[in-house]
């Protein structure tokens, strides 16, 4: 049975939530392998819109068991909120939602430290989501983190928390001149807030291994995007986890030898939230127009997203690193009204032409564009590739050629049904 890894091929917000929802209909198990509530996966089903930050968006597939893998960080307040929204819609995850005992917890001081640090960095700030992601992963790597499994014993939890609150208060008072937090109040409130999660704690790694051995269809759901990866992204303007397919094994606790194929999600243009290099960023007027057409505001923070033309060398780098078998191109309909559409095919760097995004020289890369005519027609009602206007098909063919990767699916709207199979047979998962 196939298994499939889904990753973002750009800087996040590619529409992974919708695509995962589409692909997960046939999955037995879906696992998130990194990130936390910095992600915002929006799914529209039967005129209901859900935005998931913490819980895998596949929870809407009634058959799928969802695992929050050991590479994730968890904010219990966000988690509880999402469960409450699901309950309101009469969706009960029951036994279908499992939190790996090794996943790390986000505590209130992580958020405080995240915001204070980014503020203090001033001009060098990253523009984080302020959700405590960096400090939670820093505790993990410092070997002082509190894990989901620690929520099973109040004594263990309190011991670890006491030590961490002391360390956090030192930073808060000494470095940031902020108010300290109370151990007693934090311990009491957090313990209460995590009672439901504690009942979902299990061995996600073992469950996945068993599911793979039984031959179940397993989907690995990435968050953020390739170029926000801690190692391969535009460091330091990145998130604190491994966002490309290389993160699946350490982020779920299975052998990498199990992994079969990877699909990359790419928007038909490019966006980025937060600071950092963005070679194909548009001028203000064009960006504003595209932002309005594509509703490009962050699902987590509501911040306006920076907008730019499709950057093939950025996606090509994702194709190579992840060995992508296919792409899914999303939000093609957002380009419907444009007279002309630009695509970056390569860059100039010190008089040479460069075909792949190079984060080390990102600031010096000069995009080389091809301009294509727009199709000036509404395509959100199209359901077949042949039904798309010729110019839209030519645009997609150009993206395939420049990225050196076939396109399996095209998305022309936020509803599950607004998904057009194209070279879908390239993916074993869709055969
Ligand atoms: P952090 O993950 O909150 O530490 O933020 C680090 C960088 O990653 C910032 O530029 C964020 O805007 C960006 N980022 C984090 N999560 C997402 C996401 O889900 N989509 C897009 N950008 C993100």
Image (tube, rainbow, N blue to C red):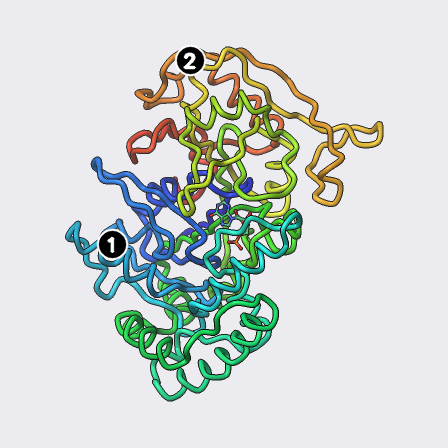
Secondary structure found at label 2: loop
Q: Which mark is residue 389?
A: 2
Secondary structure found at label 1: loop
Mark closer to the chain start, 1 or 2: 1
Between residue 67 and residue 42, name the one nearer to us: 42
Place residue 314 in its image quadrant: top right
Residue for badge 1: 63
The quadrant in which the C terminus is found is top left
Residue located at (66% from left, 25% from top): 345
The percent coordinates of residue 306 (x first, y second) are: 53, 34
The percent coordinates of residue 124 (x first, y second) are: 66, 50
The percent coordinates of residue 96 (x first, y second) are: 26, 62
Place residue 246 in its image quadrant: bottom right
Q: Is residue 279 above or below residue 158?
A: above
The percent coordinates of residue 50 (x first, y second) are: 28, 45
Is 94 on the left-hand or right-hand side of 222?
A: left
Is 413 on the left-hand or right-hand side of 118?
A: left
Between residue 202 and residue 231, name the one nearer to us: 231
Work out how far the residue at label 1 is from the one at label 2, CA to CA, in angstroms. Answer: 36 Å
Residue located at (48% from left, 15% from top): 338
């Amino acid at each position: 049975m196939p298994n499939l890894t889904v990753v973002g091929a750009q800087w996040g917000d590619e529409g992974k939530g919708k695509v995962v929802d589409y692909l997960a209909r046939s999955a037995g198990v879906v696992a998130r392998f990194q990130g936390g509530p910095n992600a915002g996966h929006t799914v529209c089903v039967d005129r209901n819109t859900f935005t998931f930050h913490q819980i895998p968006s596949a929870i809407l597939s009634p058959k799928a068991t969802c695992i929050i893998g050991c590479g994730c960080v968890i904010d219990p307040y966000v988690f509880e909120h999402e469960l409450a929204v699901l309950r309101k819609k009469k969706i009960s995850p029951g036994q279908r939602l499992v939190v790996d005992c090794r996943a790390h917890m986000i505590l209130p001081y992580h958020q405080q430290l995240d915001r204070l640090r980014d503020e203090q960095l001033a001009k060098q700030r990253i523009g984080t989501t302020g959700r405590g992601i960096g400090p939670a992963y820093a505790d993990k790597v410092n070997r002082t983190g509190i894990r989901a499994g620690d929520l099973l014993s109040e004594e263990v939890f309190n011991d670890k928390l006491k030590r961490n609150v002391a360390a956090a208060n030192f930073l808060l008072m000494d470095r940031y001149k902020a108010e300290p937090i109370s151990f007693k109040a934090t311990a009491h409130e957090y313990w209460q807030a995590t009672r439901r999660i504690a009942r979902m704690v299990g061995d996600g790694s073992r469950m996945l291994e068993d599911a793979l051995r039984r031959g179940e269809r397993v989907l690995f759901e990435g968050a953020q995007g390739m170029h926000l990866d801690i190692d391969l992204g535009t460091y330091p303007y990145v998130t604190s986890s491994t966002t490309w397919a290389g993160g699946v094994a350490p982020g779920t606790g299975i052998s990498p030898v199990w992994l079969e194929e990877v699909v990359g999600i790419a928007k038909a243009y490019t966006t980025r939230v937060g600071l950092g290099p963005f070679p194909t960023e548009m001028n203000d007027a064009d960006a504003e127009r595209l932002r309005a057409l594509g509703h490009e505001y962050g699902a987590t923070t509501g911040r306006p997203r920076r907008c730019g033309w499709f950057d093939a060398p950025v996606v090509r780098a994702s194709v190579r690193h992840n060995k992508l078998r296919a792409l899914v191109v999303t939000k093609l309909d957002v380009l419907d009204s444009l007279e002309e559409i630009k695509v970056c095919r390569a860059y100039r760097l010190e008089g040479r032409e460069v075909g792949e995004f190079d984060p080390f020289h990102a600031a010096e890369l000069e995009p080389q564009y091809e301009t294509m005519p727009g199709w000036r027609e509404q395509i959100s009602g199209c359901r077949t590739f042949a039904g798309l206007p010729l110019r839209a098909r030519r645009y997609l063919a150009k993206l395939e050629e420049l990225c050196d990767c076939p396109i399996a699916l095209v998305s022309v709207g936020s509803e599950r049904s607004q998904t057009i199979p194209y070279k879908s047979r390239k993916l074993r998962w869709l055969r």
